[in-house]
Amino acid sequence: MCFEYPATVRFRCLRCGICCGDTEEKIRCILLLRKEVELIAIATEQPLSEFAVKVKGKEPYTYEMKKVDGKCVFFKNGGCKIYSIRPLVCRFYPFELKGAFDGKYLFLYTSECKGINKGGVLSKNYFKKLFRLACLRMGEWQ
């Protein structure tokens, strides 16, 4: 596991829902792996056409979550209705994992998230768990 992470960043989710939809500044794409779509379809007993659309050029992601009024179709009454099976991109937010040319990966974060600079400093172990989850889902769930 070779990655760099923001060693001094503090974060605590404020459950504001900004990550679940569009803002005035940004149109959000909630990308999904094929297996995530299958899992959500089974768990919600909905055909994938009800909540996702096929996308190209975003590999390894093959679908994008649909939105209603700019919010994820599963964001209801201020919360995520599929939280326990939420997609990888949702689990990562406000962080993103980028590949580097030297073989290392780099965790970046967006300051648009209101939870940045709140809470405690995140440990290397926090990022290690995210990295392992990404490796697992990208390897097994494509």
Image (cartoon, rainbow, N blue to C red):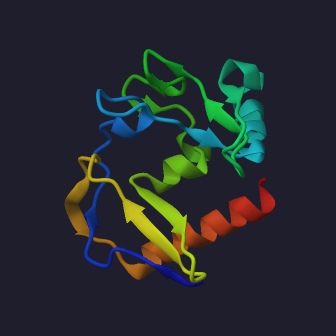
- Residue 19 vertical position relative to residue 45 in the rendered view, above or below: below
Answer whether residue 86 is visible to the viewer in this image: yes
Kindly identify the residue that appears in the image at 60 percent across and 46 percent down: 87
Residue 20 is situated, as x and y percent measured from the top left of the image, at 43, 34
Kindly identify the residue that appears in the image at 27 percent across and 69 percent down: 9
Residue 140 is situated, as x and y percent measured from the top left of the image, at 79, 61
Residue 114 placement, left or right of 122: left
Query: Nearest the camera: 56 or 1?
Result: 56
Query: Nearest the camera: 134 or 76?
Result: 134
- Residue 99 vertical position relative to residue 88 in the rendered view, above or below: below
Residue 47 placement, left or right of 84: right
Label total for image: 0
Residue 54 placement, left or right of 65: right
Residue 33 is situated, as x and y percent measured from the top left of the image, at 71, 46
Task: Kindly give the residue lying farthest to the front in the view shown.
Answer: 101
Residue 6 placement: quadrant: bottom left
Residue 115 placement, left or right of 22: left
Kindly identify the residue that appears in the image at 78 percent across and 53 percent down: 142
Kindly identify the residue that appears in the image at 22 percent across and 62 percent down: 119
- Residue 76 vertical position relative to residue 19 in the rendered view, above or below: above
- Residue 27 vertical position relative to residue 35 in the rendered view, above or below: above
Q: Quadrant of the N terminus?
A: bottom right
Residue 131 is situated, as x and y percent measured from the top left of the image, at 56, 71
Answer whether residue 46 is visible to the viewer in this image: no
Query: Nearest the camera: 74 or 18?
Result: 18
